[in-house]
Image (cartoon, rainbow, N blue to C red):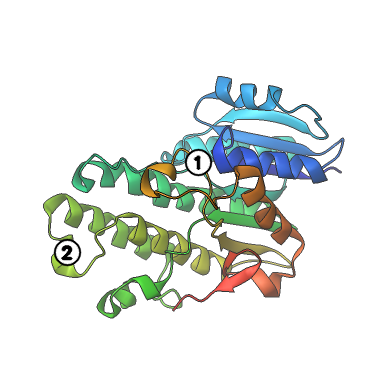
Amino acid sequence: MGKVAIITGANQGLGFGLVEQLNAIYKAGDFIYLAVRRVAKGQEAIDSIIDKKAHFEAVFMDVSKEESVQAVMEYMAAKHGTVDLVISNAAQRMDKETPYRLQVAEFIQTNNMGAYHVLKHFQPLLTKKGRLIVVASGFGTLTHLTTKLHPLFATTERSMIDINRVMHEYVEEVKAGTDALKGWPKWINIPSKIGQVALVRIAAQKKKDAQAILAVCPGLVNTAASRPFFENMKHAQSPFQAAKSIIDLIDRSPDEINGKLMKFGEEISWQ
């Protein structure tokens, strides 16, 4: 039986780089699903791949809506039974010109609840050696958060639902303008990434067999999402380059990667 993979946010940027890197190691009989909000764009991305080794399919998924993620999971379960690789990459971009209070709700709903929806519905579908990877960031560690907020992300004691509750409360604090008083960082991307990695650490505690659930930091990537926030992109990787270090993790031992945040093959300490 061939391998089965699904990548969210896969029609452009890092997501499409991951598709291309996976195609380079997959073969006939393997399946790569591009989970996208615009299926036509997903198909355009597929059509742009010159040397197709695997079978490709673009499927509609809005990760911010649980029913959308569940529908794709059920479709793939009916078609394949299990999945070898899931990469949660879809993300809402920050708008540099828009006040955070006006964009934080959609940002957290897509990036954090989206990761939660993928973990909740696709982790049970993994094969015995399956991998579920959440694309996060090096900002997703407690070292970027004041110590008084660390207990909110005590991943050995809290559930994913607890983390979701923290993130929803954070949204309300940003909207009300009280987040700074509580000690939250100014940049909304930091609490979001910490929340994503916290979800991974909790989900990884329930992995089975030789599975691995992990988060990754791809490093600086030259994409439309990154360019507005970094003046010097001279040393930024292309999406295809950045995707390689992520795909290379698939064959690593579960003990080396499960529950961890990885960057260029090395672990980034949680705290």
Q: Residue at x 59, y 72 (%)?
A: 267
Q: Amino acid under label 2?
A: Ala
Position above or below: 183 against 131:
below
Q: Residue at x 39, y 73 (%)?
A: 142
Residue 18 placement: quadrant? top right
Quadrant of the image containing the C terminus: bottom left
Q: Which mark is residue 195?
A: none
What is the secondary structure assignment of the residue under circle 1?
loop
Q: Amino acid under label 1?
A: Thr
Label 1, on which residue?
223
Number of the front mark, 2 or 1: 1
Image x and y of residue 226, in percent: 44, 45
Of residue 16 and residue 84, the one placed in the foreground of this image is 16
Label 2, on which residue?
180
Residue 208 placement: quadrant? bottom right
What is the secondary structure assignment of the residue under circle 2?
helix
Of residue 267 and residue 207, the one placed in the foreground of this image is 267
